[in-house]
Image (cartoon, grey):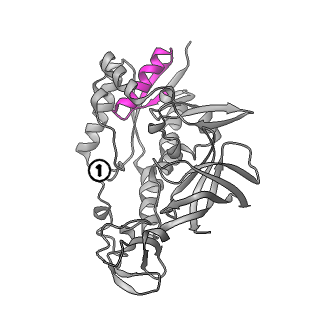
Amino acid sequence: MSEKVAVGLSGGVDSAAALFFLKQQGYQCVGVHLRLADLPEEEAKRQREEAENVAWKQKVPFYTVDCREQFRKHVTDYFSREYLDGRTPNPCVVCNEKVRWDGLMDFGKQMGIHLVATGHYAKIRKREGRYALAVPKDRKKDQTYFLYRLSQEQLSRTCFPLGIYNKQDIREMAKRVGIQAAEKPDSQEICFLPDGDRRKWFCHRPEIKKGEIVDNAGKILGCHDGICFYTVGQRKGLKISGSEPLYVKAIRKEENRLLVSGRDYVYSSEAHVHHAVWMADEKEELSGTARVRNGGPLIPCTAYREGKEHWKVLFSEPVWAIAPGQSLVFYQEDQVVFGGVMETASRG
């Protein structure tokens, strides 16, 4: 009997294609739609129906799993807390680690299904008894940055069918076999902020207070609306002027201040990374490349151990706008070695 796999279905072309390929490979597939964000019922129903239609078209059983409580606890509460603390969160990273995979794997446990699959663009390799993420064929769609916190147990039970394809190939295949989502645009927003407007999310929080915007010399240049509305490197919305364009250099929660400066001062040559997760054997020092934001370039660097789960990363070239709270993912060749959360950055 062929092996069973629980396939996460969003209703988009990627998850539909993942289901199609796994069926072609002989797996017994079950479609699983995770209800994550606490969206209006009408929107939640639309998303569920799109996912169910994918399962119906491909003649597989379909289930919905309500993960809203876990999503609120691990994702939206974290998102709010980080911005209110003057940091910049990675909600998709946390969702994959603590909600999406747990939801699929818990469902699988109840149904006697060991494997799970999604439509992410990534590969998994096993070397010397350990599992590691690797960059997919379509490097422009590489999603390893969002997946670096998956555990060895989670990786050992995961399939990424799309890792060997280009996105354009996926769309053409989907048209050819009649997948209705073939032309559906990729989602660009955070799922619980459909319009991407962070101000709406925070506008009724009583702890938000206006404060000062100051330059490197401590001169007051203006007033900010609340530190949760800003991130390092931001220029838009500051409502200040100077002899040169000014950007957020740092956010000082204790003082409720934004520190702004010219562009040159927003570059960093090193970052300090905490809460590291490893996919290879840990070393005291190693060289490779790192990505400090999703879609950003791979930057040559060297990492040095500073303590348990703490690393210092020195970049070979200055890096723009490193924001505390964001993730750094470290690669050697095309494989993820480790990743963690950046706490501080400096010009070295």
Three-letter amino acid code of the residue under disc 1: Pro
Locate residue 204, reporting x and y percent. Answer: 29, 69
Residue located at (55% from left, 28% from top): 115
Residue reaching furthest to the top: 1
Q: In front here: 245 or 198?
A: 245
Please state the horizontal and vertical placement of residue 126, each as a whole percent of the image.
67, 31
- Residue at image position (35%, 83%) is 221
Magenta segment, which residues?
6-31
Residue highlighted by disc 1: 194
Is residue 308 in sight in this rendering?
Answer: no
Q: Quadrant of the C terminus?
A: bottom right
Quarter containing the N terminus? top right
What residue occupies the far front of the structure in this picture?
A: 243
Q: Give percent across and percent down for residue 189.
A: 34, 49
Name, please, the residue furthest toward the left: 42
Find residue 244 and report its image quarter. bottom left
Q: Residues within 10 Å of mark 1 (few under 14, many from 20)?
A: few
Q: Find out whether residue 30 is within the magenta segment.
A: yes
- Residue 123 included in the magenta stretch of the image: no
For the point 67% across and 54% down, the residue is 302
Across the whole image, how many numbered discs are drawn on residues? 1
Q: Is residue 271 above or below residue 150?
A: below
Compared with residue 246, is residue 288 higher up or lower down, i.e. above or below? above
| Residue 296 placement, left or right of 340 | left
Instruction: Choose between 314 and 19: the one closer to the eye.
Output: 314
Residue at 33% of width from left, 71% of height from top?
205
Q: Nearer the viewer, residue 199 or 338?
A: 338
Above or below 323: residue 286: above
